[in-house]
Amino acid sequence: MTDFSKTRALFHLPDGLIYLDGNSLGPLPKKAVEKTTTTMREEWGEMLIRGWNAAGWMAQPRQIGDRVGRLIGAPAGTVVLGDTLSIKVYQALASALELRPQRKVVLSDNGNFPTDLYMASGLIQSLDKGHELKIVAPEEVEDAIDDTVAALMLTEVDYRTGRLHDMKRLTEKAHAAGALAIWDLAHSAGALPVDLAGADADFAVGCTYKYLNGGPGAPAFIYVAPRLAETVRPALSGWLGHDAPFAFDLDYRAGRGIDRMRVGTPPVLALAALDAALDAWEGVDMADLRAASIRLSERFVAEVERRCPDLTLGSPRDPKQRGSQVSFLHENGYAIMQALIAHDVIGDFRAPNAMRFGFTPLYLSEDDVVAGAERLEHILAERLWDRPEFHKRAAVT
């Protein structure tokens, strides 16, 4: 049984603050400060360029990728870190489409994060080969999978509602129809058990600054199934994805396995912070994490519905049908969330009307979620949200 009282001590959180936004940006792991300081002073500062060899900077994307892989059910050597999630979406989809040249449909849903859809649209326009991005409602995805689909591209957990797709069932359905399956784990990795190998997923991508607590700007990751890793052609043929980058050949030759999905220079300082953040996961059982997350979210839902009748649950009622976040809806949701933040309860807002709350047992307790609901009740009862400063939209919501 995982002792979450011990993991809470690993994070820095301001006194009196209730942080319900780990689904958007994880808090600072205390070890990350020490690790990044050491990397800057002892490695960058003293080793200078020698750090690429002496400190092993060049190997970090694979080594730390394996640490992420253990949290998402990926075998060693199948996950690599670097670049951004948008780039990794582009890579995965471009490779998938090339593996299914006779098919023209990319199937997704309207609960997918917009950037995934933007990248798909941009790729389709660049290819100019008659591909179509077909977007359906989440509950219509399974019936929409047919023999025209080249790639099924879904985010496992809906960023707005928390709705959870059945990865294994939909991947099986895609494979039965001859399609490939790409999964975005942005709101899954570190939030619930994921088994990419068990689900037989073809590709997966994700970010590390949310539930994995890697910090703002932390690198993304990409997974390629071992059966495909030696045959997929990387659409972005970056220098570090070359089989022998320091041979400086003028012609590109893809690296072995997952290394071919590397593109740019490893973000060494960001990787140092992420490496330290992953220490918090040592000894954490993902089934324990999931059970604790459900307990926290269920308590919050019960408290909010009892205290705040003007709010409507915008997430699946069954906790097994959602990830580690819930949303409540209100026409003045933005202003209410800003007032809540001003009262030291941090969640976030997703247009048009969703207040979003994340439940992260590594550092949240049941007392935290009850106190958060109490403050929300006070803000609504006293209409504290109805002030001009809370209605003014910030650049980031």
Image: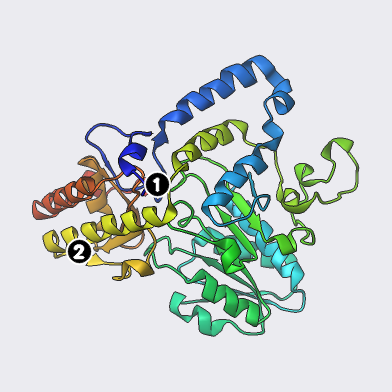
143 in relation to 207, above or below? below
Choose between 102 and 28: the one closer to the eye. 28
367 with respect to 86 (left or right)? left
Using the rendered image of the protein, determine whether residue 191 is visible from the camera's viewpoint.
Answer: no
Establish if 238 lies above or below 224: above
How many tags in the picture? 2
Q: Position of residue 337 (x, y in %)?
A: 26, 51
Q: Which secondary structure, mark 1?
A: loop
Gap between marks 1 and 2, in whole Å? 23 Å
At label 1, which amino acid type do we have? Val
Which residue type does callout 2 highlight? Leu
Q: Is 113 on the left or on the right of 257, as rendered?
A: left
Q: Is residue 189 visible?
A: yes
Within 10 Å of the Cα at label 2, are there few (<14), some (14-19), or many (20+) other Cα atoms?
Answer: some
Res. 311 mark:
2
Q: Which residue is mark 1?
A: 396
Residue that extends furthest to the top in the rendered view of this protein? 46
Picture disc at residue 137: none
Residue occupying the point 68% across, 79% down: 178
User: Where's residue 310, x and y in %?
Assistant: 16, 64
Q: Out of 74 and 164, give the one closest to the viewer.
A: 74
Query: Observer-nearest residue: 104 or 357?
Result: 357
Image location of residue 90, percent across then percent down = 65, 58
- In which image quadrant can residue 199 be found? bottom right
Kind of element beneath mark 2: loop
